[in-house]
Amino acid sequence: MNKIFYKLGVSMMILFLIVLLPLGYVMILIFTNYNEVHLYEETDEMAAQYATLITVIDDPDIELLVQSMDRVTARKMVIIDPNGNVVEDSGISGFHPSEHTTSPRETGKFIDPNDRQEYIFAGERVQNDDIGGVFIFSPSDLMDQSAIQVQQAFLLSGVGALLLALGFTFIASREFSTPLQEMERAANQMARGDLDVEVPVKTKDELGSLSHSMNELARELKRYRSNRQAFFSNVSHELRTPLSYIQGYGDALKNKLYQDESEKQQFINIIHEESHRMNRLIHDLFELSQMEEERFPLNLELVHTGDVIRRAKAKVVTEAKKKNNTIRIDMDAKLQMIVADNFRLEQIFTNLLQNAVSYTENGHVWIEGSLKDGNIEVKISDTGRGIAAEDLPYIFERFYRAEKSRSRDFGGTGLGLAIVKQLTELQYGSIQVESVPGKGTTFTLRFPEAKEGDE
């Protein structure tokens, strides 16, 4: 049952009726009051005209004048003398000017005692020795017919407006409820684990934006599930390999399946290395998890980039000499400080330098630092084997290795660059990579220069 459709429809109809009914009542009331005021004005104007007529005519025939009024219109006339006595009338009985008015120049209401007809009357003084004033009586229901016609017109227009409102309510409720139903269906599918959903985006308003967000959420959840499966698969693989080494060589030692002490020591060294590899892997996983959940503590302070790079270089210089590599630092002397975690910034540069040294033989590694557009830019370049173009978009992903066949030769966990990217972004920086296979790789890091007042 489409509950939202009926709720919207009923709410809109109630709102429409709340507006329409009082508006119609007020309009009818205004028209009725207008009719009454207009009738008073007409009656008063007619009384003034007859008073003027009687004044300008010599010896007027009062009886003929009153009878003609009675024949021509539904109005009545009463003529009084200067003493206030009724001289002539056209059917009005029981009207005594002294009881209903203090002056001929007044208006009011009078009910004929014979037929209970209600009249609106207006009087006007007459400048004549025999006639004191003239009163014109207009039936109160004289304009009722026009009022009824107006009321009927209002009723018909109200019915038409009601039908239009019903149609509009139906269309609007359906337009509002259909996307919500689609989103409810998609949400139920997602709750059941079916992430292959697509909510139609038909408008550019808030509902369209919400539908688009639902589609984005489904895609993100699907990507997250895929990444999670890949993550568990990679973790299992990464742990299975050293565990198989440890188990295999441990069994060999237990069963004394070695030829001499030299081979025994070799087995022990392999077990030692693989246990260290597992320890690094678990440590890196823990750190990366904390970074992605934004629970990673950083001790931010003002740091001089050049000092950190020189410390990172000192850690890899021995390995570089073993591979006959040279490391050169070219830092701009005017470089300012940045806001960063001293230890974690050193971890970034050390990781990148270790990668550069590991994948370069008989070559060179350069570290260049400069100030560009308010950012401290650091480039770490090497003349190593480089990275294939198809691998570049993925090298910052967890467990991704460009050279899978030789990955274990370099002792890495496959998480180093993922950690570097997370640490860089946590310290308000960015990292990019460019590489040409066979010629080398360049990592470019940018950190905002510390402003005055930063601590």
Image: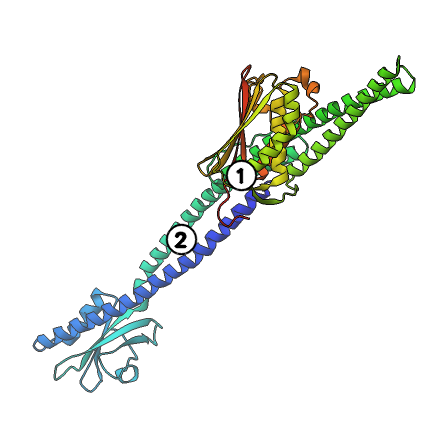
Q: Callout 2: 10 Å neighbours few (<14), some, many (20+)? A: few
Q: Quadrant of the N terminus?
A: top right
Q: Callout 1: 10 Å neighbours few (<14), some, many (20+)? A: some
Q: Quadrant of residue 181?
A: top right
Label 2 sits on residue: 155
Label 1 sits on residue: 210
Question: Could you say which is closer to the camera, residue 428 or residue 50?
Answer: 428
Image spot of residue 235 (x, y percent): 72, 26
**Residue 375 as seen in the image, left or right of residue 353:** left
Image spot of residue 337 (x, y percent): 52, 41
> Nearer the N terminus, badge 2 or badge 1?
2
**Residue 19 as seen in the image, left or right of residue 115:** right
Image spot of residue 265 (x, y percent): 84, 19
From what the image shows, is residue 107 above or below residue 74? Answer: below
Element marked by disc 1: helix
Q: Nearer the viewer, mark 2 or mark 1?
A: 1
What residue is rendered at 47% in x and 56% in y? 18
What residue is rendered at 68% in x and 15% in y? 405
